[in-house]
Image: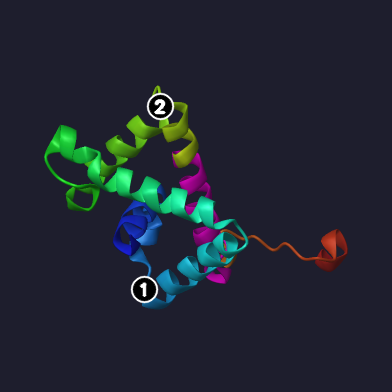
Amino acid sequence: MHRVFRAVAATVVPEAADLDATGWLELERIVEGALAARPVAVRRQLALFLQIVQWLPVLGYGRPFTGLPAARRAQVLAAIERAPVQLLRRGFWGLRTLVFMGYYGRAAAAAAIGYRADPRGWEART
């Protein structure tokens, strides 16, 4: 499911496609850390949802998600995001949140967008 997660991440955050091995490792460690605090059932649901994302496009495009070009991947995720089945929409939003957390939680991404949060709050900026 590593490959599917990376394909989803690169579709949700196109800049993620440019990550090197270290960047991907950092992104995945952030996500894995967040998932470690979740019940096993939630982790299983995520794995199942990634399987659905991988194989659902076979019905419409004859190829799995990882075999599609970027534009088609975006169409597939947009369709899941708007799906009439609430469970699919929730799965997408949960997965999307994990991708954002992993990508933007990296120090390099925070620096690139000028994010300078500090536990000391505004006092740190003076």
- Dot 1 or dot 2, earlier in sequence: 1
Query: Which SS class for mark 1?
Result: loop
Residue 74 in the image, given as x and y percentages of width and height: 31, 40
- Near-viewer residue (21 or 94): 94
- Local packing at callout 1 (Cα closer than 10 Å; few below 14, some 14-19, many 20+) is few
Residue 97 in the image, given as x and y percentages of width and height: 53, 48
In the figure, is residue 120 to the left or right of 36? right
* Mark number displayed over residue 73: none
Circle 2: residue type = Arg
- The vertical placement of 3 against 57, above or below, is below
In this view, which residue lies farthest toward the bottom? Answer: 22
Which region of the structure is painted magenta?
92-109
Q: Disc 1 marks which residue?
A: 20
* The C terminus lies in quadrant: bottom right
- The vertical placement of 63 against 118, above or below, is above
Query: Which SS class for mark 2?
Result: loop
- The vertical placement of 20 against 70, above or below, is below
- Local packing at callout 2 (Cα closer than 10 Å; few below 14, some 14-19, many 20+) is few
